[in-house]
Image (cartoon, helix red, strand yellow):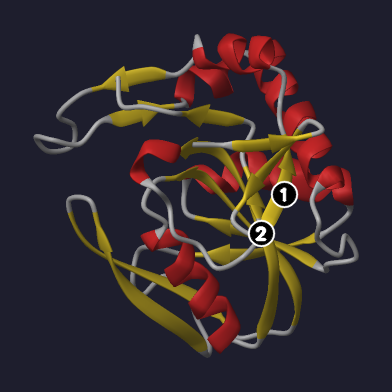
Amino acid sequence: MKNIINGLYIHGRFQMKIIDISIQNLLKTFIHEYPDWPIKGVKYFDINPLYKNAKARETLVTACMEQIEEMSIDLSFDHIAVVESRGFIIGSILADYLKKGLVLVRNKPGRLPGEFCFREHLLEYGNGRVEVQKGTGKVMLFDDVIATGGTSQAAADALTSAGYEVVGAQFLVELTYCEPKFAFPYCAPIQYEQQI
């Protein structure tokens, strides 16, 4: 159950701005749901139609920017760490607006040259691995969806091992019914409270 105080969603010890429900509902009309994909028992949220519609995409980026500005994190971070591949799109737009560098978090092994760190993790439908090149600076993690938090936490752990300081995260969609576990402050303009 959400704890809402003065328009802020109190999530554990973190707080984030609630996006107006009418904006959430508008954005959700562009998200297509595919039950039992990629395997039985998993519901896939296809955000590609949201990317295709320029006005909806602009609304989404504005909602993300508002939440980032309201988050209880140090906004002087250096980079946005974008998770492959759906995190690359909006994360790159946000990095441009915020004048931040990009750090790529790859989920396909062997795609990064030089020194890198990796973390393996469980997915709802198998195993995963994330890799990031070594570096320094404060980063905000960005990905499309947080469900259980496994990929997100693995990405944060890999970033930390690679020399970065994770200050928080932004996601496009939070599946609150999956009870995500993530050790940093985060926000998401779109929430699904229950599995439909």
Q: Secondary structure at mark 1?
A: strand
Kindly identify the residue that appears in the image at 73 percent across and 84 percent down.
Answer: 136
Residue density around tag 2, few if under 14, some if 14–19, many if 20 or more, within 10 Å: many
Q: Establish if 55 lies above or below 132.
A: above
Q: CA distance from mark 2 to mark 1?
A: 7 Å
Query: Given the image, on which type of amino acid does mark 1 rest?
Result: Gln
Determine the image quadrant of residue 184. bottom right
Instruction: State left or right for residue 72 relative to residue 156.
Output: right
Kindly identify the residue that appears in the image at 52 percent across and 30 percent down.
Answer: 191
- Asked whether 108 or 113 is in front, the reply is 108
The percent position of residue 68, horizontal first and vertical second, equals 79, 46
Furthest residue in direction left, as rendered: 40
Instruction: Specify the label residue 185 is tagged with.
Output: 2
Determine the image quadrant of residue 89. top right
Q: Establish if 13 lies above or below 113.
A: above
The percent position of residue 27, horizontal first and vertical second, equals 58, 16
**Tag 2 near tag 1, CB within 8 Å:** yes
* Residue position marked by numbered label 1 in the rendering: 15
Query: Given the image, on which type of amino acid does mark 2 rest?
Result: Pro
